[in-house]
Amino acid sequence: MHRAHNMKYTLFIFLLIPLFASAQIDTILSSNIQRTYKIQLPDNYDLKKRYPLLLVFHGYHYENLGMPEYTGFDKFTNKHCIVAYPHGLKEENGINYFWNSGGGLSVNYEGVDDVKIIDNLIDTLTRNYSVYTDSVFITGHSNGGMMVYRLALELSHKITAMANVSGSMMFDSIVPEYPLPVLHIHGTSDPIVPTAGYSGPIWPSMNVDSVLYQWAAWNHCNPKPDTIANTATYLYVQWTDKTGKKMVLGSFIKNQGHDWAAITNSGWNVAENIWYFFTRREFYNFPE
């Protein structure tokens, strides 16, 4: 009897671990493809409360397991929201991971529907966790940032706001169904995804200025941006809609390259700026 009681107690604790552990690896099956993601719950996670959901997308070649530390989201989002780090698909060479963010990639990997997978993942997370569905945010780096732009185009009915770091849009042939606040962060000396764009066959990327102007039009903003700050360190521009809401923000970090962590280490904290934008639609912590 005592042994049976202990077994029931052990089983009870085991069943609680996936629900209340602060971080764990899980999987989702979509279109017969199984993908993994890391899920991180807030400290003192409470089923009676609703939390924002943040999805963070790694770049080409990266795996998702190191993204909390690389991006810096591990340092403060535990107190604020549920964070998911989805894992892209391994490329045919068996080495690199990627997102089918459009352009030439869609030609090579037309059977990989990452939009559907993330759509299903959002449904799964909002069903299994206490998610505030009016606060679903997405951000990504490089190829992950390109994927974030694609998701903003195709899932604007589910996503509250997006932030891109060192990526760009690969196409603009789809018009988003709803307006969507956009934050774009880019180093002006980025050699991998240049702000001027790239017209290659596999990794085409649009000129960043044209991307922001396009989103300003889709978000019904004033046609010309306001320059909020222009220093030796950074350039901030923003577009507002007719009600004064800040809908498109561009942060150009001067003399910085492609690397998220390097930009943060230079004194401009990428993760804090992104979270501040998601929650307040403002720039945060202007460096001198």
Image (cartoon, grey):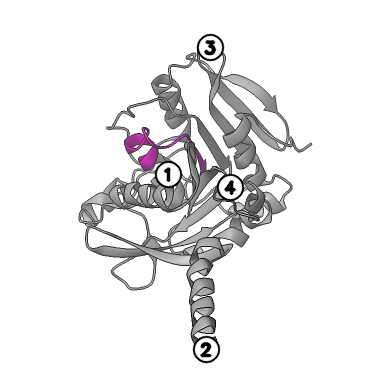
Q: Which residue is mark 2?
A: 3
Q: Is residue 105 rendered to the left or right of residue 276?
A: left
What's the distance in space between the residues labelled 3 and 2, CA to CA? Answer: 67 Å
Which x, y percent locates residue 75?
68, 55
Residue 162 in the magenta stretch? The answer is yes
The one of 266 and 269 positioned closer to us in this rendering: 269
Kindly identify which numbered label has been placed on residue 81.
Answer: 4
Q: Nearer the viewer, residue 202 or 150?
A: 150
Question: In which quarter of the view is residue 174 placed?
Answer: top left
Q: Which residue is mark 1?
A: 148
Residue 240 makes an appearance in the image: yes
Residue extent of the magenta highlight: 150-166
Magenta stretch: includes residue 126 = no
Q: Nearer the viewer, mark 1 or mark 4?
A: 4
Residue in view at x 53 percent, y 79 percent: 10
Work out whether mark 3 precedes mark 1 in sequence or the reverse, and give the earlier one: 1
Q: Amino acid at mark 3?
A: Thr
Kind of residue at disc 2 = Arg
Q: Nearer the viewer, mark 3 or mark 2?
A: 2
Describe the element under mark 4 as helix, strand or loop: loop
Q: CA distance from mark 2 to mark 1?
A: 51 Å
The dot on residue 243 is 3
Q: Are marks 3 and 1 in contact (CB under 8 Å)?
A: no
- Compare marks 3 and 2 and give the one earlier in the sequence: 2
Residue 252 x %, y %: 60, 36
Closer to the N terminus: mark 1 or mark 4? 4
Disc 2, SS: helix
| Circle nearer the N terminus (4, 3) | 4
